[in-house]
Image (cartoon, rainbow, N blue to C red):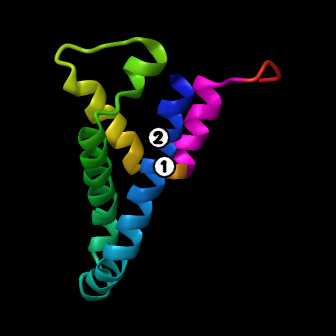
Amino acid sequence: MVVKQVLMALALAAMAEGTTEYLLGPWFELLKAKWKEAEQVAPMKYVSAAVGVGFAFAYQLDLLATAFEIVSKPPWVGVLLTGILLGRGANFVHDFAKRYLFPTQEQ
Protein backbone atom coordinates (compact mmCIF):
# COMPACT_ATOMS: atom_id res chain seq x y z
CA MET A 1 0.00 0.00 0.00
CA VAL A 2 2.86 2.39 0.78
CA VAL A 3 4.44 1.85 -2.64
CA LYS A 4 1.12 2.55 -4.37
CA GLN A 5 0.64 5.79 -2.42
CA VAL A 6 4.20 6.95 -3.12
CA LEU A 7 3.78 6.22 -6.83
CA MET A 8 0.52 8.14 -6.74
CA ALA A 9 2.28 11.04 -5.01
CA LEU A 10 5.05 11.04 -7.63
CA ALA A 11 2.50 11.05 -10.44
CA LEU A 12 0.48 13.85 -8.84
CA ALA A 13 3.62 15.87 -8.11
CA ALA A 14 4.70 15.54 -11.73
CA MET A 15 1.23 16.59 -12.87
CA ALA A 16 1.18 19.54 -10.46
CA GLU A 17 4.62 20.66 -11.59
CA GLY A 18 3.77 20.23 -15.26
CA THR A 19 0.42 21.96 -14.95
CA THR A 20 1.90 24.90 -13.11
CA GLU A 21 4.91 25.31 -15.39
CA TYR A 22 3.03 24.76 -18.65
CA LEU A 23 -0.15 26.73 -17.97
CA LEU A 24 1.10 29.48 -15.68
CA GLY A 25 4.84 29.72 -16.32
CA PRO A 26 4.57 32.11 -19.29
CA TRP A 27 2.25 34.41 -17.34
CA PHE A 28 4.64 34.59 -14.43
CA GLU A 29 7.51 35.38 -16.80
CA LEU A 30 5.49 38.33 -18.10
CA LEU A 31 4.74 39.38 -14.53
CA LYS A 32 8.45 39.29 -13.65
CA ALA A 33 9.27 41.37 -16.71
CA LYS A 34 6.78 44.05 -15.71
CA TRP A 35 7.23 43.89 -11.93
CA LYS A 36 10.82 43.27 -10.87
CA GLU A 37 9.87 42.56 -7.26
CA ALA A 38 7.82 39.55 -8.37
CA GLU A 39 11.01 37.53 -8.53
CA GLN A 40 11.63 38.16 -4.83
CA VAL A 41 8.04 37.29 -3.91
CA ALA A 42 8.18 34.11 -6.03
CA PRO A 43 4.45 33.78 -6.74
CA MET A 44 5.00 30.55 -8.69
CA LYS A 45 6.00 28.83 -5.44
CA TYR A 46 2.64 29.64 -3.85
CA VAL A 47 0.64 28.69 -6.92
CA SER A 48 2.51 25.37 -7.09
CA ALA A 49 1.68 24.73 -3.44
CA ALA A 50 -1.99 25.51 -4.07
CA VAL A 51 -2.11 23.14 -7.06
CA GLY A 52 -0.44 20.39 -5.00
CA VAL A 53 -2.86 20.90 -2.11
CA GLY A 54 -5.77 20.80 -4.54
CA PHE A 55 -4.57 17.49 -5.98
CA ALA A 56 -3.98 16.01 -2.52
CA PHE A 57 -7.51 16.91 -1.41
CA ALA A 58 -9.04 15.74 -4.69
CA TYR A 59 -7.44 12.31 -4.26
CA GLN A 60 -7.46 12.26 -0.42
CA LEU A 61 -3.75 11.50 -0.36
CA ASP A 62 -2.13 11.53 3.10
CA LEU A 63 1.43 10.19 2.99
CA LEU A 64 1.95 10.58 6.74
CA ALA A 65 -1.00 8.33 7.48
CA THR A 66 -0.04 5.83 4.80
CA ALA A 67 3.70 5.59 5.35
CA PHE A 68 4.05 6.22 9.08
CA GLU A 69 0.53 5.53 10.38
CA ILE A 70 0.42 9.05 11.80
CA VAL A 71 -3.11 10.41 11.66
CA SER A 72 -3.62 13.99 12.74
CA LYS A 73 -6.62 15.44 14.45
CA PRO A 74 -8.17 16.92 12.37
CA PRO A 75 -7.36 14.42 9.62
CA TRP A 76 -7.20 17.02 6.83
CA VAL A 77 -3.86 18.29 8.17
CA GLY A 78 -2.03 15.27 6.76
CA VAL A 79 -3.64 15.83 3.37
CA LEU A 80 -2.66 19.51 3.50
CA LEU A 81 0.97 18.67 4.32
CA THR A 82 1.04 16.07 1.55
CA GLY A 83 -0.31 18.68 -0.85
CA ILE A 84 2.44 21.11 0.08
CA LEU A 85 4.92 18.31 -0.57
CA LEU A 86 3.30 17.64 -3.96
CA GLY A 87 3.56 21.33 -4.78
CA ARG A 88 7.33 21.15 -4.45
CA GLY A 89 7.44 18.90 -7.51
CA ALA A 90 8.25 15.38 -8.59
CA ASN A 91 11.99 15.55 -7.93
CA PHE A 92 11.42 16.67 -4.36
CA VAL A 93 8.85 13.92 -3.73
CA HIS A 94 11.19 11.32 -5.24
CA ASP A 95 14.08 12.45 -3.04
CA PHE A 96 11.80 12.45 0.03
CA ALA A 97 10.55 8.93 -0.70
CA LYS A 98 14.05 7.64 -1.38
CA ARG A 99 15.45 9.14 1.82
CA TYR A 100 12.63 8.58 4.33
CA LEU A 101 10.26 5.94 3.01
CA PHE A 102 12.64 3.52 1.32
CA PRO A 103 16.07 4.06 2.85
CA THR A 104 18.72 1.62 1.69
CA GLN A 105 21.02 -0.09 4.13
CA GLU A 106 24.00 1.71 2.56
CA GLN A 107 22.82 5.14 3.76
Where does the image place residue 94, in percent across and percent down from the top left?
Answer: 58, 42
| Amino acid at the residue labelled 2 | Met
Residue occupied by mark 2: 8
Where does the image place residue 6, in percent across and percent down from the top left?
Answer: 51, 34
| Amino acid at the residue labelled 1 | Ala
Instruction: Please give left or right for residue 19 compared with residue 11 in the image.
Output: left
Q: Is residue 54 magenta?
A: no
Circle 1/circle 2 CB separation < 8 Å: yes
**Residue at 83% of width from left, 22% of height from top?**
106
Where does the image place residue 51, in percent across and percent down from the top left?
Answer: 28, 54
- Magenta portion: prevailing SS class: helix
Where does the image place residue 20, in percent across and percent down from the top left?
Answer: 35, 66
For this rendering, which residue is in front, 29 or 19?
Answer: 19
The quarter in which the C terminus is drawn is: top right
**Residue at 30% of width from left, 77% of height from top?**
28
Mark 1 → mark 2, Cα distance in angstroms: 5 Å
Q: Is residue 99 magenta?
A: yes
Q: Looking at the rendering, which quadrant does residue 56 occupy?
A: top left
Q: Which residues are magenta?
A: 91-103
For residue 11, the mark is 1
Give the total of numbered labels: 2
Location of residue 24 with respect to 13 vertically, above or below: below
